Structures are given as C-alpha cells and as structure tokens.
Image (cartoon, helix red, strand yellow):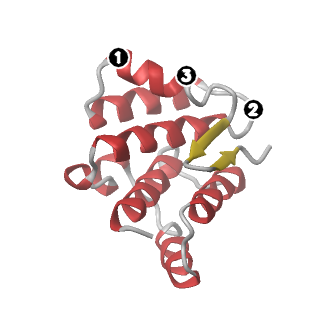
Amino acid sequence: MTPSEKNIVRSLVAVAWADGKMEEPESNVIEGLLCGFDASPEEEAELTEWAQTRRSLEADIPLAELGTEDRELLLANAALLTQVDGEVSASETELLERLIQLLGFEREEADAILSSVADGALRLGSKALTDAS
C-alpha cells in the first residue's frame, strides 16, 4: 500500500466510527478496501488494530496529506459505507455533509462523487468494491 492508500483507509475508519461504534458491515467494507489496495498481511494487521480504537473525523483524517483524488476516493467510499446496511439514515446523511465540508468539496463536485456510488459499487482501477449486503 502507498502512504496515500493508508491515509484513505484510516480516514474511512474515522467515518465508520462517526456514530460511536464500528459494526460488522462497516468493517467488511474496510476489509474490502484493504483487499482492493493489495494490503500486505502486516499492513492489514496494522490498520485492523488501528481501527479497534474509536476515531473521529476531525482528529483522525489527515486532511493535509490527502490530495484531490484521495479526497474523492474517501468521499466515495464513505458514501458506500453509509449504504452498506441498505438504507442511509439521517445521521449518515449528516455525516456525509460534514465530511464534504471537511474535504472542501463544492456541492456540485460532491454530488457527482456521491452519484458515482449510488448503485452500491465503487471501482478502484480494475477492481470493484461492492457493499457486503
């Protein structure tokens, strides 16, 4: 994994923890992302361990280290994460709005990114990550 990919996974963990708990469907999406990024067993263990502790958007997303493509990928995966249980709650919608603001996206940009995962799948190069439900 590249440092950028690790930052995206760490950021996505913070998104998963935003409601105060990490549930199995969310951890499945993160595991899928690790697979999509071809994480080594050591990297997977490191990031899985890191994910065991409650994280927050403001404290744990390394904004200064995320480029435009990283931010787009993070928002798309965060949207996918909110869809994993089959419905997007009001609190999940609020979370995405907070993330959009933190990442500095204009509304039009954010809407384009969110619509890219409306079918529950996100492409990473030649690999597709789909929700676990």
Disc nearer the start of the sequence (3/1) = 1
Q: Distance between the residues labelled 2 and 1?
A: 24 Å
Contact check, label 3 and label 2, Cβ < 8 Å: no
Which one is in front in this view, the residue at disc 3 or the one at disc 1? Answer: 3
Contact check, label 2 and label 1, Cβ < 8 Å: no
Rendering coords of residue 121 (x, y %): 67, 37
Tell me the quarter of the picture where residue 40 sits.
bottom right
Within 10 Å of the Cα at label 2, are there few (<14), some (14-19), or many (20+) other Cα atoms?
Answer: few
Tell me the quarter of the picture where residue 110 sits.
top left
Within 10 Å of the Cα at label 1, are there few (<14), some (14-19), or many (20+) other Cα atoms?
Answer: few
Q: Residue 86 carries which label?
A: 2
| In the image: residue 64, left or right of residue 29 | left
Rendering coords of residue 119 (x, y %): 69, 28
Above or below, 127 against 116 in this view is below
Secondary-structure class at tag 3: helix
Q: Which amino acid does label 2 sit on?
A: Gly
Q: What residue type is labelled 1?
A: Arg
Above or below, 31 against 61 in this view is below
Which residue, given by chain and number where applicable, does mark 3 sit on?
A: 115
Furthest residue toward right: 133
- Residue at 35%, 60% in the rendered image: 4
Which residue, given by chain and number where applicable, does mark 1 sit on?
A: 107
Furthest residue toward left: 64
Contact check, label 3 and label 1, Cβ < 8 Å: no
Above or below, 76 against 112 in this view is below
Tell me the quarter of the picture where residue 98 sits.
top left
Rendering coords of residue 13 (x, y %): 49, 56
Q: How far apart are marks 3 and 1 (CA)?
A: 12 Å
Residue nearest the observer in this picture, 18 or 124 = 124
Secondary-structure class at tag 2: loop
Q: Which amino acid does label 3 sit on?
A: Ser
